[in-house]
Amino acid sequence: MNYETSVKAEEIGADFDSEARARRRRALIIGGIVVALALALAFVMFGRKSGQPAPVAAQGSKAQAPEVTVIKPGRELVASTVSATGTLAARVDMPVGVVGEGGMVTQVLVQPGAWVRAGQTLAVIERSVQVQQSASLQAQINVARANARLAEQELARSQQLAGRGFVSRADIDRKLATRDQAAAQVRVAEAQYRESLARTGRLDIRAPAAGLILTRSVEPGQVVGSGSGTLFRLAKGGEMEMRAAMAEADLSAVHVGGTATVTPVGSNQSFNGQVWQVSPVIDPQTRQGMARIALSYNPALRPGGFAQAEVVTGQMNAPLLPETAVLSDQNGSYVYIIDGDQKAQRRPVKTGQVTDKGIAILDGLTGEERVVLSAGAFLNPGETVKPRLTAFGR
């Protein structure tokens, strides 16, 4: 019994020693791992502070560089324009009033918006008195013609008798004078009759030229005369124009024959026109002059309306950029370009004409730079990026 007990005790002691050794090995292994992690962390932290970037960190930074879309704008011809505002009007606005003695209006034959031909009757004035006067003058013509025939016949008889010696030469001269006087009275009566017809005809208010009726300010029953003013306004040929007010500097760049685009206020439709007159004077108070832009007729062009015009003054060769590429702050307009080291650099620019294709750059770019198309506001000068070239306006 004692022998077995001692053997079992030795076995239990051996097991206890092996288990203790295993625990010590695990503790040493765990301690080594902790020390290794601490050394690695210290190396990373102190290595960055001393300016020695870790390779893994550098690879992570490169992977995090933002990708930006860039364009090469190149150069192209851009129309230089001048913007102006003004009013629409008839190119030739013709007032129509009473030409004759006037009277009571019996008929108005046209409405605003009607097209009329030259000489067409617009309104009729009552003429009963004038008609009777014309009839009286026509009767006087008949009387004068009868007297002229009688004088001609008497002259012929006297000339026959003079050949026989029964009538003196003095009587012949008197008969001849009477015949001529009667013929002259016929001509006077005819002239008076034609004058009466002309006066009666002037009672009709007629269109002085073919065109479009703009306004009407007369009604049947209204008594009109030479002091009644304008009864109708007519746009000759229906031609319209825009009277664009421009600053002195802008007006100096505008020339007769230049093209323009006119957009009435409240309309999405634009109309092509041509400058046909540039004001030779400048208003001393407003320091503005006027450019008159001829326009073809269109119902959307209403005289008296307000409109905006873009007048072409010439052409220039410049880079074009979309609006998203051009930024601005208190220092002015600028763009971001990507240099050869793939870094974003701020470049100040001078902008010009804004067109449907983009913004013309007058100064600051050659057109061969890689310009950030959008998201420039989120970049910092010197920041490394990954550019992706795309096409714009091509």
Image (cartoon, rainbow, N blue to C red):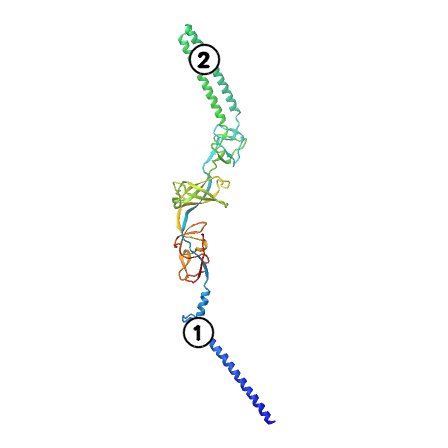
- Compared with 119, 341 (above or below) is below
In the image, 44 versus 291, the foreground residue is: 44
Q: In front: mark 1 or mark 2? A: 1
Q: How many marks overall?
A: 2
- Can you tell which mark lies on residue 320? none
The quarter of the image holding the N terminus is bottom right
The picture places residue 307, in percent across and down from the top left corner, at 47, 44
Amino acid under label 2? Glu
Structural crowding at the residue carrying mark 1, measured as other residues with C-alpha within 10 Å and reported as few (<14), some (14–19) or many (≥20): few
Snapshot quadrant of residue 333: bottom left
Question: Quick check: marks 1 and 2 in contact, CB under 8 Å?
Answer: no
| CA gap, disc 1 and disc 2 | 145 Å
The picture places residue 57, in percent across and down from the top left corner, at 45, 69
Amino acid under label 1? Phe
Q: In the structure shown, which secondary structural element does the residue marked by tag 2 occupy? A: helix
Residue ID at (50%, 22%): 134
Structural crowding at the residue carrying mark 2, measured as other residues with C-alpha within 10 Å and reported as few (<14), some (14–19) or many (≥20): some
In the image, 361 versus 170, the foreground residue is: 361
The picture places residue 216, in percent across and down from the top left corner, at 51, 35
Q: Earlier in the sequence, mark 1 or mark 2?
A: 1
In the image, 84 versus 69, the foreground residue is: 69
Looking at this view, name the residue that lies furthest to the top. 165
- Can you tell which mark lies on residue 43? 1
Q: Which residue is mark 2?
A: 152
Looking at this view, name the residue that lies furthest to the bottom. 2
Q: In the structure shown, which secondary structural element does the residue marked by tag 1 occupy? A: helix
The picture places residue 207, in percent across and down from the top left corner, at 48, 32
- Compared with 135, 306 (above or below) is below
Looking at this view, name the residue that lies furthest to the right. 1
Residue ID at (47%, 23%): 194
Is 229 situated left or right of 318 in this image? right
